[in-house]
Image (spheres, coloured by chain):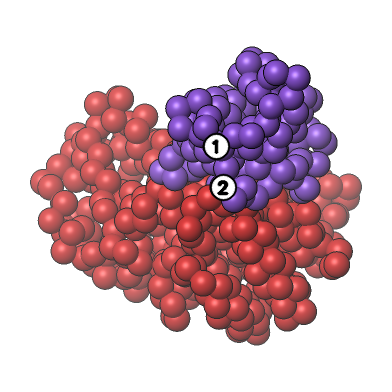
Amino acid sequence: MGLGYTEKVMEHFKSPHNMGEIKNPDGVGKVGNPVCGDVMKIYIKVRRYKGKEVIGDIKFQTYGCVSAIATTSMMTKLAKGKDLDAALKISRNDVANALGGLPPIKMHCSHLATEALEAAIKDYRKTGKKKAK
Amino acid sequence: MMDKVYLDNAATTRVDSEVLKAMEPYFTKDFGNMASLHSCGREAEHAVEKARRDISKKVNGKDHKLVFTSGGTESNNFTLKGVAFANRDKGKHIITTKIEHECILNAAKWLEKQGFDVTYLPVNKEGFVELDVFSDAIRKDTVLASIIHANNEIGTIEPIRELGKIAHDHNVLLHTDACQSFTKVPIDLKKDNIDLMTINSPKIHGPKGAGGLFIRQGVKMEPLLHGGGQEFGYRSGTVNVSGIVGFAKAVDIMKDKHLKHMEKIRDMLIDGATDIPESWLNGPRGKDRLANNAHFSFRHIEGESLIVHLDLKGIAASTGSACSSKSLEPSHVLMAIGLQPEDAHGSIRFSVGKENTKEEIEYTLRSLHEAVETLRKMSPLK
């Protein structure tokens, strides 16, 4: 259709992973701006596993283009089950590569997706830590 | 699921089978160069001159020469650059609007770099150029005003006759880009005070690569293409005989019943789509709206996602969202009518054609309702 998306991107757009909200999340991150056409909101639930803080559950809501939706979906898939430090190491390229690449003009979407995750983890570390079990 | 529902007829249309049939002999039998003296060339010349007469008749073009070009972009570039350079001694000011097609806007920007002055008129919320805004913009050194006849995104039909009257009262030439409106809106070049008019073939079930520019006799123009002096010296290059024949056929077969049909299914779309909460129609309703255009905004979702959702269901439409453009800027037309960027992102254009059926529109509306709901469920904006 002339947009240059990979099959993997289309797969995640059609059936996004981890879409929705978490009630009583341990951390929430929101990035982007409706004026620019992208807003991503990430909810995380953190649990302790072998002495580490692990992303037990993660959900997202995205307003944006095909690539914005697909990158948030892929990011949540990559982050789920990872300990927080490992999750923070997920880069924009990791997300884009896992999708088989993104059109150059859409690379900022994968950047936003990882920023949203960072924001959620930061939020957890600041406010949600006590709540996490 | 329906096979394919094509609702992007403002982008381009399917070539009608009658058009294709009319063109065919000019590829294989009468393929001659109309500049040649032999009979093969003469057949081609007859065909082109008949096409010129037939198309001119449609718009009362007795006082105008129809110069065939490669399409809307060429005709619009030719107008702006051709008039600007040929009339430099008279003045260096050109007026156009903020809602023109990119080929006008980018040609105008280029002229600014060459030392010309351009005023870009604002429009109101429905996309109309207001008459007093236009007359206030005219200066002593204004030579040309170029105002789109019907807007390609939101379907607003401008009051071209009144605008032309004002232009002529001030000794300014009026050009109109009629790519979307030609054969859909009645035009009388004389009564409508039009000096130059761009038309094209691929929007009306004719072939791509064919278009034209009506030029009133006596208007001074520099050619864009120099060469063998074809098309009265205005446009050199071997004439696209088959394309022109197809163009004329496309004009000939467009009938009132097609327009009535388009208006009917357009209104079906408008009524059905604006039933969706937090949605609205952009551009006017009724007789000042192009027969085939329906343009909507949906809050809290983004246009590219909507287009792709519909495409997965076999429906072809287009969007003015930034994310679908190379520049990542929202549509200049939607900005000009005062939409907020976030609302412009959630916009979609359906442009119907004579071939679309009522069933296709019903299917499209069902799919549209579903797609908007799916994307809103995903959206964090409420």
The numbered mark at residue A24 is 2
* Rendered view: B237 above or below B59: above
* Rendered view: B318 above or below B110: below
Q: Amino acid at mark 2?
A: Asn
Give SS at disc 2. Answer: loop
Q: Residue at x 82, y 36 (%)?
A: A7
x, y percent for residue B14: 75, 59
Rendered hue of chain B is: red
Circles 2, 1 touching at the beta carbon (< 8 Å): yes
Question: In the shown orientation, is residue A46 left or right of residue B357?
Answer: left
Q: Residue at x 59, y 58 (%)?
A: B376
Q: Residue at x 30, y 25 (%)?
A: B113
Between B378 and B229, the one lying in front of the other is B378
Q: Residue at x 33, y 70 (%)?
A: B159
Choose top left, top right, bottom left or bottom right for residue B326: top right
x, y percent for residue A96: 70, 24
Q: CA distance from mark 2 to mark 1?
A: 9 Å
Mark 1 or mark 2, which is nearer the start of the sequence?
2
* Residue denoted by label 1: A131
Chain letter for mark 1:
A
Between B346 and A124, the one lying in front of the other is A124
Chain letter for mark 2:
A
* Residue A73 visible in rendering: yes
Could you classify mark 1 by the number of other residues whose Cα lies within 10 Å: few (under 14), some (14-19), or many (20 or more)? some
Question: In the shown orientation, is residue A60 left or right of residue B43?
Answer: left
User: Which quadrant does the C terminus of chain A fall into?
Assistant: top right
Rendered hue of chain A is: purple
Q: Nearer the viewer, mark 2 or mark 1?
A: 1
